Image (tube, grey):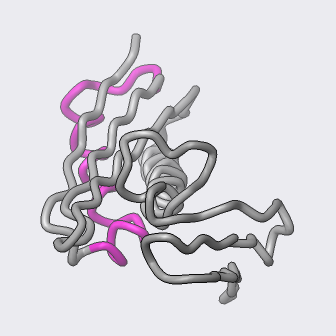
Amino acid sequence: MAATRTAQTHWEGNLLQGAGQVTLKSSGLGTYDVSWPARTDEEANGKTSPEELIAAAHSACYSMAFSHGLAGAGHTVESLDTQADVTFQPGEGITGIKLTVQAKVPGLSEEDFQAAAETAKANCPVSQALKAVPSITLEATLLP
């Protein structure tokens, strides 16, 4: 079954001084301010950016793919905590994504954990959509 999710952005002004709002239409969860400085300054100052939204999508998708793969191999996932750091370089675009995951999966060996983590990274639909990103790295930690 296919599903379509929708977000909409209203923008006013030019790129550098303008601003906009992105609305998560499908979920109705809210409207968020976006701006160029939120993409390029060290501090986002209460505004989001396309890169932060990509980070949210990637961390959620990776967690789902990883938990699904582990369950399919017969493992029970107690918890997965995934962070995605998306690096944006003006003039170059998105230059890298670092996925960091910590997981509690009782009875899973370190070797099997690392293999499953890499498989999830390769097969997560958002990872697939982001294949043009020059570097997507993964740091996976199996917690006791």
The total of numbered circles placed on residues is 0
As drawn, 41 above or below 19: above
| Residue 128, picture quadrant | bottom left
- The residue at the point 53 percent across, 65 percent down is 35
As drawn, 28 above or below 47: below
Q: Is residue 7 left or right of residue 132?
A: right
- The residue at the point 43 percent across, 49 percent down is 66
Place of residue 29 in the rendered image (x, y in percent of width and height, measured from the top left): 82, 60
The residue nearer to you, when weighing 132 against 22, is: 22
Name the main secondary structure of what is drawn in magenta.
helix
- The residue at the point 49 percent across, 48 percent down is 63
Q: Is residue 80 left or right of residue 116?
A: right
| Residue 114, picture quadrant | top left
Place of residue 36 in the rendered image (x, y in percent of width and height, measured from the top left): 45, 65
Stretch in magenta: 105-130
| Magenta stretch: includes residue 113 | yes
- The residue at the point 36 percent across, 27 percent down is 108
Place of residue 3 in the rendered image (x, y in percent of width and height, measured from the top left): 69, 85
| Magenta stretch: includes residue 101 | no
Place of residue 71 in the rendered image (x, y in percent of width and height, measured from the top left): 51, 46
